[in-house]
Image (cartoon, helix red, strand yellow):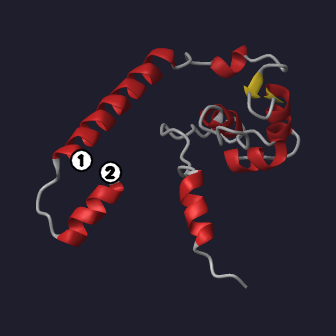
Amino acid sequence: MAALSIARTLLGAPTPEPREAALRRHRDRLRAFAEAMGAVHRPGPGWTGWLRPDTEICRCEEVPAARVTEAVDTLGARDARTVKLLTRAGMGWCQGRTCGPAVAALAGRATGEKPPRTGARSPAPYRSAIWRNCRSRAVPS
């Protein structure tokens, strides 16, 4: 959609094409579905009290709750970034998309701050074909 919008702007096309409108509708439906799933499956109040020390917070890096708690209580981590650096929680395949809110909530427990309501943000990965195209155009040294 971004590429279509840029092309439309550069070429001076005044209105979005049908394909762009269809993509926007599809995106909006997916976002609505994600919000509904998040609302239905959101843990209840006090969920951090339900955790056992061996409960995995980050499945990608196999980081248990005990390690996150140690980073906060013993090592002095006060935010999700510091917990990530000390425990590797959020550094796996999902880049914190799955465990990010839990890590932020556990890190915020020490300061009494509530984690942001927004999900974890991370840039989209490059597609390998695009990367290959960029490398093939690189100037040899």
Q: Is residue 79 visible?
A: no
Measuring from the top left, give residue 47's x and y in whole percent: 64, 18
Q: Nearer the viewer, residue 21 or 127?
A: 127
**Relative to 38, residue 75 above or below:** below
Element carrying mark 1: helix
**What amino acid type should be assigned to the residue bearing mark 1?**
Glu
Disc 1 designates what residue? Answer: 20
- Among the 4 quarters of the image, the one containing residue 28: top left
Q: Is residue 123 visible?
A: yes
Give the Cα separation between the discs numbered 1 and 2.
Answer: 6 Å
Measuring from the top left, give residue 48's x and y in whole percent: 68, 22
Side of 91 relative to 27 (left or right): right
Measuring from the top left, give residue 31's x and y in whole percent: 36, 33
Between discs 1 and 2, the one toward the N terminus = 2
Q: Nearer the viewer, residue 3 or 51?
A: 3
**Relative to 75, residue 64 above or below:** above
**Relative to 138, residue 63 above or below:** above
The residue sitting at 68% across, 42% down in the picture is 111
Side of 31 relative to 133 (left or right): left
The residue sitting at 53% across, 49% down in the picture is 124
- Among the 4 quarters of the image, the one containing residue 140: bottom right
Quarter of the figure with the C terminus: bottom right
- Among the 4 quarters of the image, the one containing residue 29: top left
Measuring from the top left, give residue 49's x and y in whole percent: 71, 18
Side of 94 relative to 23 (left or right): right
**What amino acid type should be assigned to the residue bearing mark 2?**
Met
Q: Are marks 1 and 2 in contact (CB under 8 Å)?
A: yes
Q: Residues within 10 Å of mark 2 (few under 14, many from 20)?
A: few
Q: What is the number of the mark on residue 1?
A: 2
Furthest residue toward bottom: 141
Q: Nearer the viewer, residue 137 or 74?
A: 137
